[in-house]
């Protein structure tokens, strides 16, 4: 889920040469880090020393006050174009080969048309200020000048604006929701929405995580109004909750809730993040904080990975310039040992599923940043995992943002949906952004199919929106850093109608000009037989027309009966 609360990741270099400096030019676009070896996960033979449990975290957040958010990592670079010399003829003649050769050392060469001409100056000049933390010599003005010359020469003036025709058959009533008591905090920062299940997995409504209030919120099934949206468990501070998931922690056949927390709104290298779980008990819920220090935890999924009878966790800890990692939190008698599955920065999503049908759960993780790769960690059953690359995406500016498992073609196995639409690194909506799916056939994933294109598509949801018996897909755009006066040129919510075989789709626009949807969910909230769309909103005001910006925490597109 790369966004403001995930932040940006930048460069670690391993060589000091002219080509290495040019490599940095390509890296900065998405925050490249050098390849680091995967650390093997070894079987734990002895339990660790018990650590104290922290139960029932009930620290209230400050009402009426918003956490300070710095935009320092988006500031204009100190270095200016006028500080650079003109490239020599010899440098110009070698520029393309040098840039492409250097980029290939880290990732597939970044094409010049990944960004419009006007964007390259800020990207390249910002790079000069991002090498210090790794004790690398900064690029020289001459090297910057060569890179800037080549990318501006080859880049297009603008990128294609992808738009879809308006939906004319489906009808919705649009309802904005803000929890009562939080009206003073009307700058929402919703991070996740999931189906809330009770005993025996019976759906009860939806659960929402929200960053600025640091709360979880819920809507039970029934009438859709602001009175229905209320804080979950009261004023519990979840330390900037970024992602939520379900699982049975204590094997009592009740679904518990797991929370991954960032520990702060702004990007940081500090290990301020963490995880907690909420136990479903007679009479209510009880929160337990896991006593581990993590980087900015942005995703979580749970299962008994080592088949020892308890619930383990897999966490994506997204850093700034580190410490981003893919982690396995091994449960040993309710104490957790942190195991590193992969040390690379940029993991945005991880899911657990038994891909190879051997009765243990494997891990599938989406690695963003300059890597842009989908990875399977096959569970060997003895506390170790074998890494296999499933899919390498076209280039380093792809902007991967989410991963979902769903049987999209309804053939009895769960396929993978991949979403790409991150714009927070380079502030550029791209025509390649959208939703695609990777088809599962037996124990393998084959065939990469396009569903919809949507610049800035941060999240997607799956459900039968039109009631014809197959799965449709809704894509939501999240581009809060784009000045609000420019929002009108972008679709902000679209749906792809499944034409029957999950290989052909008809894409229509539901909303234009409000790209602040950081989460999306499909459900029949009011139980009237019509599917509703719920978007979680994240507003980051940076432009004019602020009075016209929707500031509700949730926006519900209440489905209406079709004529």
Image (tube, rainbow, N blue to C red):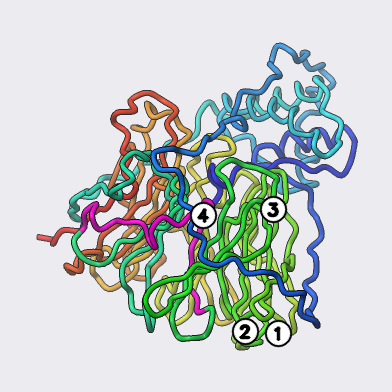
Left or right, residue 322 beside residue 472: right
Residue 8 in which image quadrant: top right
Q: Which residues are magenta?
A: 224-248
* Cα separation between marks 2 and 1: 7 Å
* Cα separation between marks 2 and 4: 27 Å
* Cα separation between marks 3 and 2: 26 Å
Give the residue drawn at x 51%, y 54%: 242
Residue 17 image position (x, y, % from top left) = 90, 35
Q: Which residue is mark 2?
A: 360
Q: Magenta stretch: residue 236 in it?
A: yes
Q: Which residue is mark 4?
A: 242
Going from the N terminus, do you reach mark 1 or mark 3 first? 3
Q: Which residue is mark 1?
A: 381
Foreground label between 1 and 4: 4
Screen quadrant of the C terminus:
bottom left
Give the residue drawn at x 28%, y 49%: 180
Counting other residues with Cα less than 10 Å from the Cα at mark 4, is it few (<14), some (14-19), or many (20 or more)?
many
* Cα separation between marks 1 and 4: 30 Å
Foreground label between 3 and 2: 3
Going from the N terminus, do you reach mark 3 or mark 4 first? 4
* Location of residue 559 with respect to 511 vertically, above or below: below
Q: Are marks 1 and 3 in contact (CB under 8 Å)?
A: no
SS state under label 3: loop
Residue 61 image position (x, y, % from top left) = 46, 47
Q: Are marks 2 and 1 in contact (CB under 8 Å)?
A: yes
SS state under label 2: loop
Residue 94 image position (x, y, % from top left) = 82, 28
* Cα separation between marks 3 and 4: 15 Å
Q: Which residue is mark 3?
A: 324
* Location of residue 542 with respect to 265 vertically, above or below: above
Going from the N terminus, do you reach mark 3 or mark 2 first? 3
């Amino acid at each position: 889920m790369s966004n403001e609360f995930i932040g940006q990741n930048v460069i670690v270099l391993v060589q000091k040469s002219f080509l290495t400096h040019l490599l940095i030019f390509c890296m900065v676009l998405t925050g490249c880090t050098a390849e680091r070896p995967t650390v093997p996960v070894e079987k734990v033979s002895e339990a660790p020393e018990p650590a104290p449990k922290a139960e029932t975290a009930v620290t209230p957040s400050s009402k009426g006050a918003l956490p300070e958010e710095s935009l320092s990592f988006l500031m204009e670079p100190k270095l200016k174009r006028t500080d650079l010399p003109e490239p020599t003829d010899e440098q110009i003649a070698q520029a393309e080969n040098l840039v492409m050769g250097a980029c290939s050392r880290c990732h597939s060469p970044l094409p010049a048309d990944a960004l419009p001409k006007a964007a390259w100056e800020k990207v390249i000049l910002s790079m000069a200020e991002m090498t210090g933390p790794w004790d690398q010599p900064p690029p020289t003005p001459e090297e910057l000048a060569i890179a800037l010359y080549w990318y501006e020469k080859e880049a297009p003036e603008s990128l294609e604006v992808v738009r879809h025709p308006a939906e004319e058959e489906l009808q919705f009533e649009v309802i904005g929701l803000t929890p009562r008591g939080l009206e003073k905090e009307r700058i929402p920062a919703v991070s996740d929405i999931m189906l809330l299940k009770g005993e025996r997995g019976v759906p009860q409504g939806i659960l929402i995580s929200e960053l600025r209030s640091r709360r979880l919120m819920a809507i039970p099934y029934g009438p859709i109004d602001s009175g229905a949206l209320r804080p979950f468990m009261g004023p519990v501070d979840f330390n900037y909750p970024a992602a939520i998931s379900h699982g049975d922690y204590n094997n009592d056949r009740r679904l518990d809730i797991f929370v991954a927390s960032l520990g702060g709104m702004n990007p940081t290298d500090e290990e301020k993040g963490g995880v907690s779980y909420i136990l479903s008990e007679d009479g209510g819920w009880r929160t337990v904080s896991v006593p581990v220090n993590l980087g900015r935890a942005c995703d979580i999924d749970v299962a008994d990975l080592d088949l020892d009878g308890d619930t383990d966790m897999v966490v994506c800890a997204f850093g700034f310039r580190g410490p981003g990692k893919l982690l396995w939190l091994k449960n040993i008698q309710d104490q957790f040992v942190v195991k590193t599955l992969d040390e690379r920065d940029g993991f945005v999503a991880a899911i657990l599923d038994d891909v190879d049908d051997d009765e243990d759960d494997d891990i599938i993780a989406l690695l963003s940043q300059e890597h842009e790769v989908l990875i399977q960690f096959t569970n060997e059953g003895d506390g170790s995992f074998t890494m296999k690359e499933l899919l390498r995406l076209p280039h380093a500016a792809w902007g991967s943002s989410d991963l979902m498992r769903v049987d999209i073609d309804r053939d009895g196995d769960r396929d993978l949906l991949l979403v790409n639409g991150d714009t927070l690194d380079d502030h550029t909506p791209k025509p390649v952004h959208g939703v695609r799916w990777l088809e599962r056939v037996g124990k393998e994933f084959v065939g990469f199919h396009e569903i919809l294109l949507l610049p800035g598509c941060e999240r997607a949801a799956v459900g039968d929106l039109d009631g014809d018996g197959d799965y449709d897909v809704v894509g939501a755009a999240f581009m809060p850093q784009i000045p609000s006066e420019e929002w009108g040129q972008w679709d902000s919510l679209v749906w792809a109608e499944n034409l029957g075989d999950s290989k052909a789709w008809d894409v229509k626009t539901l909303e234009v000009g409000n790209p602040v949807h950081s989460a999306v969910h499909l459900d029949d909230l009011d139980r009237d037989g019509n599917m509703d769309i719920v978007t979680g909103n994240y507003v980051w005001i940076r432009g004019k027309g602020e009075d016209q910006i929707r500031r509700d925490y949730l926006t519900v597109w209440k489905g209406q009966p079709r004529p």
